[in-house]
Image (cartoon, grey):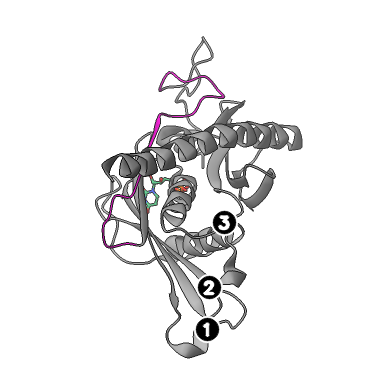
Amino acid sequence: MGMKSDIKLIDDNGLRIDGRLPNQLRPIKMEVGVLKRADGSAYIEWGGNKIIAAVYGPREAYPKHIQDPNKAIVRARYNMASFSVDERKKPGPDRRSVELSKVISEALESVIFTERFPRTTIDVFIEVLQADAGTRVAGITVASLALADAGIPMKDLIVGCAAGKIDGVVVLDLNKEEDNYGEADVPMAIIPRTKEIALLQMDGDMSYEELITAMDMAMEAAQEIHRMQIEALKRKYTEIEEVE
Ligand code: UDP
């Protein structure tokens, strides 16, 4: 978040540097079932982000001592490819990716009926191929599709979406420049049907009223992203019916 700068993020017409309105999402494309060896998989392009998710499981947890006799363990691993960012990222886990893996695991677990699969793990690999801000929320959104593709029972498809503040204006879905030079970024994971919040983080600063506005914006956008997820699932599963 923002080194304060002279860069103008909102122009005289109230538009953002990529031409969006404050409450407008970047373009989003989703595809389900992109990897044949995974139990479930999906791909998302969200603005300049390109992310793939692969799900394996539920499968017997190994070594045995990590097994939970009452439920499945959800293990998400968020990884950024070294070529995904401007300045080559050193391969392998770092503090950021370990933290993101943890919070993403917890967000996904909140919608999965884990008690139906005792002693198992559900592994979710999130590979960021190209990053342009908002990768954790796009990662949650695509992971949720991969979980559905794997047939894992969930109470809803979870959606990630961020809002924030740039040039004094509350906006939806910050891109990289906005993330760099804006005042605040608030990534959220939302369960659209119940409007529960399964992840809420904030970087930067904004007023209480602005935070509420940002959360409302993300909540509304989550409903739209949820419809896109359902469309993406329908596209895969109706195609298969046609082939058979
Ligand atoms: N980023 C980067 N190198 C890194 C980590 C992040 O260039 O090692 C960029 C990347 O484009 C990322 C953005 O900074 O999407 C914002 O990162 P942040 O940690 O806020 O997470 P995100 O918004 O992607 O969830």
Q: Which residue is mark 3?
A: 154
Is 22 in the magenta? yes
Pick whichever of labels 1 and 3 is earlier in the sequence.
Answer: 1
Within 10 Å of the Cα at label 3, are there few (<14), some (14-19), or many (20+) other Cα atoms? some
SS class, disc 3: loop
**Which residue corresponds to the image point at 55% horizontal and 40% vertical from the top-left?**
162
Q: Main secondary structure of the magenta part?
A: loop
Point out the residue furthest to the front here.
244
Spatial CA distance of label 3 from label 2 is 14 Å
C-alpha gap between disc 2 and disc 1: 8 Å
Element under label 2? Answer: strand
Question: Of the residues shown, which amino acid type is indicated by label 2?
Answer: Ile
Secondary structure beneath dot 1 equals loop
Q: Amino acid at mark 3?
A: Met
For the residues bearing labels 2 and 1, Cβ distance under 8 angstroms: yes
Residue 156: assigned label: none
Label 2 CA crowd tier, 10 Å (few <14, some 14–19, many 20+): many
**Is the CB of mark 2 within 8 Å of ligand 1?**
no
* 60 vs 171: above or below: below
Of the image marks 2 and 1, the number of the one nearer the N terminus: 1
What residue span does the magenta drawing correspond to?
18-38
Query: Residue 80, percent across and down?
Result: 34, 55
Q: Which residue is mark 1?
A: 67
Q: Which residue is mark 2?
A: 73
Judged by depth in the image, the label closer to the viewer, 3 or 2, is: 3
Label located before the other in sequence (3 or 2) = 2
Could you say where residue 59 lies in the image, as x and y percent from the top left?
A: 43, 75
